[in-house]
Image (spheres, rainbow, N blue to C red):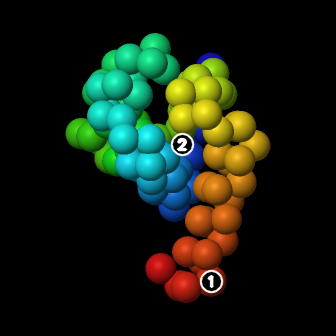
């Protein structure tokens, strides 16, 4: 089974939310990655909105990864997703 690519705008919105949560928490990318059980490179890609730098494909993290990240940030998964959706709807309204 192949994974379908996530809409690049949604991947960028998730990246912005992750960067914001990390900045608020005062953690490094390495700290977040370690606590979430993923590699630093994987986390860096998520914060860039990418799943592969060379191909430029948008990030599409697994649900388990999102759950782990929400735990690290002390944010319920529903709030993490809501923040992505809210950011996404604001972006569309602004025409960017």
Does residue 46 sit above or below 2 in this rendering? below
**Residue lying furthest top in this view?**
37
Depth check, front residue: 62 or 86 = 86
Residue 61: image x %, image y %? 54, 32
Q: Which mark is residue 66?
A: none
Q: Which residue is mark 2?
A: 5
Q: Is residue 86 visible?
A: yes
Give the quadrant of residue 47: top left
**Residue lying furthest left in this view?**
54
Does residue 85 sit above or below 38 in this rendering? below
- CB atoms at circles 1 and 2 under 8 Å apart? no
Q: Which residue is mark 1?
A: 93
Q: Quadrant of the N terminus?
A: top right
**Left or right relative to 56: residue 94:** right
What is the CA distance from the residue labelled 1 to the residue labelled 2?
Answer: 23 Å
Give the quadrant of residue 25: top left
Could you tell me which secondary element the residue under label 2 belongs to?
A: loop
Identify which residue is drawn at 66% across, 71% down: 89
């Amino acid at each position: 089974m192949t994974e379908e690519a996530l809409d690049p705008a949604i991947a960028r919105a998730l990246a912005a939310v992750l960067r914001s949560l990390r900045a608020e928490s005062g953690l490094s990318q390495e700290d977040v990655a370690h606590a979430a059980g993923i590699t630093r490179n994987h986390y860096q890609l998520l914060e860039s909105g990418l799943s592969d730098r060379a191909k430029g494909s948008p990030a599409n993290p697994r649900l388990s990864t999102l759950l782990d990240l929400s735990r690290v940030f002390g944010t319920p998964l529903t709030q993490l997703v809501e923040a992505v959706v809210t950011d996404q709807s604001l972006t569309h309204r602004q025409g960017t």
